[in-house]
Amino acid sequence: MSQDQQKHAEDDFEGGDADPSEQKQQDSTSGKDNEQHSEREEEESRELPSQAAAVHQHLRKDGQKELARDSMALLWSAIAAGISMSLSMVARGLMHANLPDSGAGFMIECLGYTVGFIVVILARQQLFTENTVTAVLPVMSHPTLGNFGALGRLWGVVLAGNMIGAAIAAWTFLHMPIFDTPTQEAFTTLGKHVMENTTGEMFAKGVVAGWMIATLVWLIPAADQAKVWIILIITYVMAIGELTHIIVGASEVLYLVFSGEASWGEFLFHFGFPTLAGNVVGGTFIFALISHAQIRGDLEAQRERKQGLIQRRHKKNRQKKAPDRSIND
């Protein structure tokens, strides 16, 4: 086996839909094998040179699983996430309609912004801005054409699904007899407030929002029982800072589009593309690149140490076999 093949066998991943035969083989493994696999993972985590490397490894493995998922499974999960994210608009709109127009009212209202993120992340639904970190790490570890193609497929499917879900929710809230007039007006106010940003502000605020969501994703593996608090704190700060998020903002701006308060051109070119670019830049090109760079040296040192252990093990095996041959002769 060549060095490249050995490297691929150890850690690489070529994206695409999962092979059904491999899936059946995984499903047929016994509980004992699963326990042994968990023990090996814990042992590997203990051998990692830093806690940051352990977090990186955890997220990278999650990213590999996401890149291998079936496209239709991704799409339905992404649609569910788009609908769930609209809960941020609903919760904030309800609070906006029932709280006084004051500083204290604004601070309480911003708590509603966190609801959609809590639901989506704890339900493990596919959110585009999460995948700007998780799915990018395995591609950074092994930047092959196949992995870049798998990343593009994942991003395209998840973004489309999120937008479909946000559009379904916005249309439903507008046309179904669910909310009273003050709440409907609050939804319109939220959307108009987002559209008050210039194109440059949409992008700049989107960069910070993408970076904060990436930070959230990085913290969750170590959060244990404090996951909800981590999600709440970070997304609450996003709400107070009035940062732009492509999926939450899509629900609010699409509500304006369906009610005739904004055009599709404004949705795409004033809000959509600048915010999407900002989220990707903040989540991928800033946070993910820096996070990968900080542990790259640690991973190379670990790989060299493993190779040294393998070589010493082979040497011991050859030494054991040598006396056996002499005895047989």
Image (cartoon, rainbow, N blue to C red):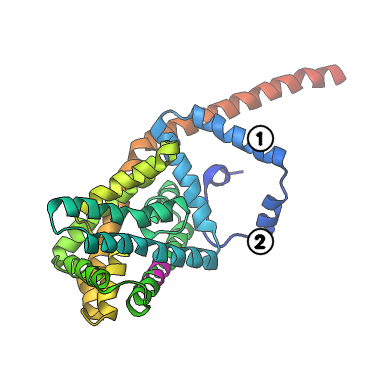
Give the quadrant of residue 263. bottom left
Q: Are marks 2 and 1 in contact (CB under 8 Å)?
A: no
Which SS class for mark 1?
Answer: helix
Q: Residues within 10 Å of mark 2 (few under 14, many from 20)?
A: few
Residue 312 appears in the rendering: yes
Question: Where residue 245 sits in the image (x, y, percent)?
Answer: 28, 60
Dot 2: what SS?
A: helix
Q: Quadrant of the C terminus?
A: top right
Residue type, label 1? Gln
Q: Is residue 307 visible?
A: no
Camera-nearest residue between 184 and 296: 184
Name the mark nearer the viewer: 2 or 1. Answer: 1
The residues bearing labels 2 and 1 have C-alpha atoms spaced at a distance of 24 Å
3 w.r.t. 161: above or below = above
Query: In front here: 248 or 183?
Result: 183
- Furthest toward the bottom, the residue is 260
Would residue 187 appear left or right of 231 to someone viewing this image?
Answer: left
Res. 36 mark = 1
Range covered by the magenta-colored residues: 161-165
Q: In percent of the image, x 30 and y 58: which residue is there?
A: 280
Is most of the magenta stretch helix, strand or loop? helix
N-term mark: 2 or 1:
2
Horizontal and vertical percent position of residue 315: 64, 24
Residue hosting label 2: 20
Amino acid type, residue under disc 2 in the picture: Pro
Q: Residues within 10 Å of mark 1 (few under 14, many from 20)?
A: few
